[in-house]
Amino acid sequence: STDINSAKLAFNEFDTLYRKDDPNITNERYRKVLRSFLQFRGISIPNKDPVIHGGSDSQGDYATVAMNPQEVELVAKFIGESKGEVYQDMFRIHHESFPRPQTLHSWIPNIEIKYADVDGESYPFGQSSVYERKQHKHYNKLILEPQALDAAVKYQGKRFIDLPFSEFLSEYAGVLREAYVEIGKISPDIVYPKGTDGWLWTNKPVYSIRHSAAVQWINRTSFDVNLVATMGWEKPDTLTKYYARISTNNIMEKGVCYYCSPPSVMSSQPLFCSAPHALAYTYGARRK
């Protein structure tokens, strides 16, 4: 028979061996598998249980894991040259709409083209609904970047790739890691400790895109975490805590918009007062 106390004892023994060579390594994956198994057997476990709790090990350490638009374009080009058009298209769509990897793999885009009017001009953007199995929920996704929108329309009604998930994930993660080296996010000669940006780029290259896309959307919406959370997170505090911690820089940048109220010193990561102004900016428009 299985009971929670013997499960905890067994897990503690496993954890001691697992962390023997690297005390900083996370046991999150194994801990969550054990939780799921125990819950399947009808055993109730408090979410904050000290041994097999349900939380994530990331506590906002990776809030600065993000690519600016120039880096996104360089990665897209690198992927296109290394793996071809399909992977390049997938990356562009992924960085706009941040579905989870399993969802991206099985997603059949159904893109609705809509238009936003900004200062008398009309700009197209894409909207799609995506079902995330992990949360058992549909999320509306927006695609503003013109090349990502073109890519999404191209796959309307069909899957991106016909490979088994494990094979796809291995291929995609491999080329992303190479691309991050190419743009200077990581060096292949450095072993990055957990909790640093380099660790996430190296060890979770696909997951890093979800971080980067979250930061991009927060910058497009004047740091509106609640609004961005509606596109892919169960709770807004998850987004604040794990993905895009609001920093003191953001406090002083509130109200900056590269389209309608640009700062005198521009950075490589543009900021906007609203998504329609971000959309106009991506099409090259600037308020006169």
Image: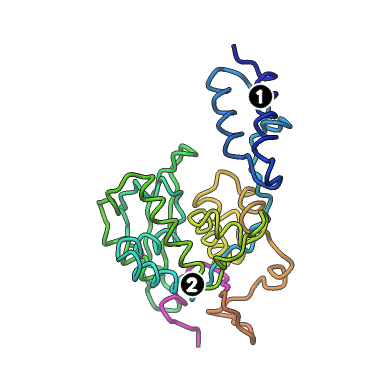
Q: Is residue 256 left or right of residue 153?
A: right
Tag 2: amino acid: Glu
**Marks 2/1: CA–CA distance:** 43 Å
Q: Residues within 10 Å of mark 2 (few under 14, many from 20)?
A: some
Q: Nearer the viewer, residue 158 or 170?
A: 170
Q: Which mark is residue 182?
A: 2
Q: Is residue 176 left or right of residue 126?
A: right
Q: Is residue 236 above or below residue 277?
A: above
Q: Is residue 127 magenta?
A: no
Q: Is residue 48 above or below residue 187?
A: above
Q: Is residue 138 left or right of residue 185?
A: left
Quadrant assignment for the N terminus: top right
Q: Which residues are magenta?
A: 270-288
Residue visible at 71% across and 31% down in the picture: 51
Which quadrant of the figure has residue 5? top right
Picture coordinates of residue 223 (x, y %)? 62, 63
Residue 277 in sight from this viewpoint: no
Picture coordinates of residue 110 (x, y %)? 30, 52
Tag 1: amino acid: Ala
Residue 249 in sight from this viewpoint: yes
Give whichever of discs 2 and 1 has the lower sequence position.
Answer: 1
Q: Is residue 78 above or below residue 244?
A: below
Circle 2 SS class:
helix
